[in-house]
């Protein structure tokens, strides 16, 4: 049989990427009744583990530094019948021959799920300088934790969510912390400039210095970081610098495969990438989300979990493929407060429907034209999923405002 | 089937409420309220999905 023969029933599934999306992919394939060979390939030596705790629980004093794993080695290998290739990054893909290159070997597939995630961007020129870290992997988190345990004066570069969680962890230990952001307002891309500024008040209220509109012009120190120099000439002393300036989808290993890549593996609404039998899921996937009729990439826990499962089901049963449609959702914990966001942050305006953006609690709704497209809450756990459902139902913005009036306000407004 | 919640693990992320809103609701303190401990016949699929999809593995089903 030639490699180009179209098989409707794949007999082997290869999943590249052994984090949440990859794990959910192999689980879902088995749950769907797939009985063929499954291979899970990961570059880290660890079993699939949960990433959100890396910037939260794991950084707390005295907390265990063992990863939160979802399934044991025995469960994966014996119960799910998954062949594990861990600590071995995939180095290439040949979609015509239907093989993935791993080390010097070729792993053949009928169906492939690409779930290689994203790599944290570093600070150029700081490679090899002790005390400068990104926070993406278990090993990164353990290094940051060690520095906090040693009482590091902490500087976070980039006012994003993960960096803000690190600043929060430093302050909870009473350590000095500074967040430096090159843009004039924090979190502008994620939640818009006004509400980004509102969330950043949490930093100043909790004793973290926030320096916006300041780029890092130099990292001081020989062998080990001693401080960072900002655009305005200020030097901030630091024993620990955590760089949280976003992540880049890991598509470098696909070079030469001719798989379409554009800030992620380009997929249709079924998570199908541009080659027969190839799907993508998680941070690496740029797919067409029919709910908002646009191409997007969601670097979030729930998207990784759901896309992994959907991509694998579509891959092993292509005749019953279903589109992946979602309202993106993420959460972040700062200084004991919970931030939640669902949907997409648009530029058409927002309205605070409960609480006060200068206070401890609020609910903000975003619009695009006359449609409700997003909800941001600070300590509004009771509210967020209700609006997420309205977004999924294509609710109009005025319907959401009317709904908000029927809901009891957040705690602060009743105090 | 009964829903068993491990409060020590639950942090009120709300994925369960998103999947099965008739059974799970997070309150303002971030505490999960299980509205019906017995799994309603008509919500079995959603509840199973919610239990399996819990980010902190705080939910399980007991027959």
Image: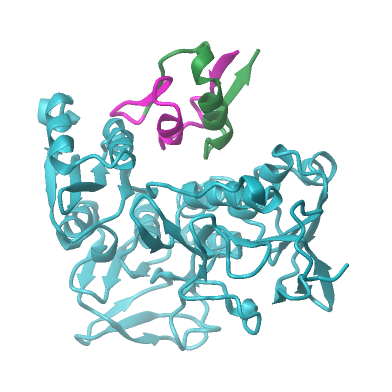
In which quarter of the view is residue A175 placed? bottom left
Q: Quadrant of the N terminus of chain B?
A: top right
Q: Is A183 above or below relative to A360? A: below
Q: Nearer the viewer, residue A393 or A47?
A: A393
| Chain B, hue in figure | green
| Chain letter corresponding to the colour cyan | A
Please, is residue A228 above or below residue A39 in the view?
below
Q: Give the main secondary structure, helix, strand or loop, of the magenta stretch.
A: loop
Identify the magenta region. B1-30
Q: Position of residue A80 (x, y in %)?
A: 79, 42
A287 and B31: which one is in front?
Answer: A287
**Quarter holding the C terminus of chain B?**
top right
- Indicate the position of residue B12 as horizontal and vertical percent values: 41, 33
At horizontal 70% and vertical 45% (from top left) the residue drawn is: A29
Side of A221 where A318 appears, left or right: right
- Its colouring scheme is by chain
User: Is B57 part of what is drawn in magenta?
Assistant: no
Front-lying residue, A298 or A238: A298
- The residue drawn where x is 85% and y is 42% is A78
Relative placement, left or right, of A203 versus A174 is left
Residue A66 at least partly seen: no
Tell me residue A164's x, y (percent): 34, 59
């Amino acid at each position: 049989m030639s490699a180009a023969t179209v098989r409707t029933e794949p007999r082997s599934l290869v999943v590249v990427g052994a984090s949440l999306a990859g794990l959910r992919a192999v689980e879902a394939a088995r749950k769907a009744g797939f009985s063929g060979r499954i291979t899970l390939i990961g570059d880290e030596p660890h079993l699939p583990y949960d990433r959100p705790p890396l910037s939260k629980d794991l950084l707390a004093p005295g907390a265990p530094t063992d990863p939160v794993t979802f399934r044991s080695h025995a469960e994966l290998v014996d119960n799910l019948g998954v062949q594990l290739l861990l600590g071995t990054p995939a180095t290439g893909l040949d979609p015509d021959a239907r093989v993935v290159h791993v080390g010097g070997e070729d792993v053949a597939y009928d169906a492939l799920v690409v779930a290689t995630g994203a790599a944290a961007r570093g600070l150029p020129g700081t490679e090899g300088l002790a005390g400068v870290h990104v926070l993406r992997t278990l090993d990164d988190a353990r290094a940051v934790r060690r520095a906090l345990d040693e009482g590091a004066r902490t500087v976070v570069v980039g006012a994003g969510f993960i960096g803000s969680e690190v600043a929060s962890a430093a302050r909870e230990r009473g350590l000095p912390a500074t967040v430096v952001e090159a843009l004039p307002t924090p979190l502008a891309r994620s939640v818009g400039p006004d509400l980004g500024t509102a969330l950043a008040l949490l930093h100043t209220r909790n004793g973290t210095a926030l320096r916006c509109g300041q780029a890092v012009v130099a990292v001081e120190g020989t062998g080990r970081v001693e401080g960072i120099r900002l655009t305005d000439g200020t030097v901030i002393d630091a024993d620990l610098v955590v760089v949280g300036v976003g992540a880049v989808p890991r598509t470098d290993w696909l070079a030469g495969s001719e798989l379409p890549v554009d800030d992620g593996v380009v997929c249709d609404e079924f998570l199908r990438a541009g080659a027969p039998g190839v799907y993508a899921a998680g941070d690496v996937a740029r797919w067409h989300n029919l709910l908002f009729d646009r191409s997007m990439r969601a670097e979030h826990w729930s998207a990784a979990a759901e896309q992994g499962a959907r991509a694998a089901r579509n891959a092993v049963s292509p005749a019953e493929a279903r589109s992946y449609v979602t309202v993106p959702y993420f959460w972040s914990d700062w200084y004991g407060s919970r931030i939640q966001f669902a949907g997409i942050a648009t530029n058409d305006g927002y309205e605070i429907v409960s609480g006060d953006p200068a206070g401890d609690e609020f609910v903000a709704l975003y619009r695009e034209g006359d449609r409700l497209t997003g909800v941001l809450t600070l300590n509004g756990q009771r509210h967020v999923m209700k609006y997420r459902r309205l977004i999924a139902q294509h609710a109009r913005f005025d319907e959401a405002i009317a709904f908000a009036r029927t809901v009891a306000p957040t705690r602060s407004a009743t105090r | 089937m009964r829903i068993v919640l491990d409060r020590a693990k639950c942090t009120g992320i709300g994925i369960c409420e998103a999947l099965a809103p008739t059974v799970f609701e997070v309150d303002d303190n971030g505490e999960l309220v299980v509205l019906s401990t017995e799994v309603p016949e008509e919500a079995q699929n959603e509840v199973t999905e919610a239990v399996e999809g819990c980010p902190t593995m705080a939910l399980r089903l007991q027959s």
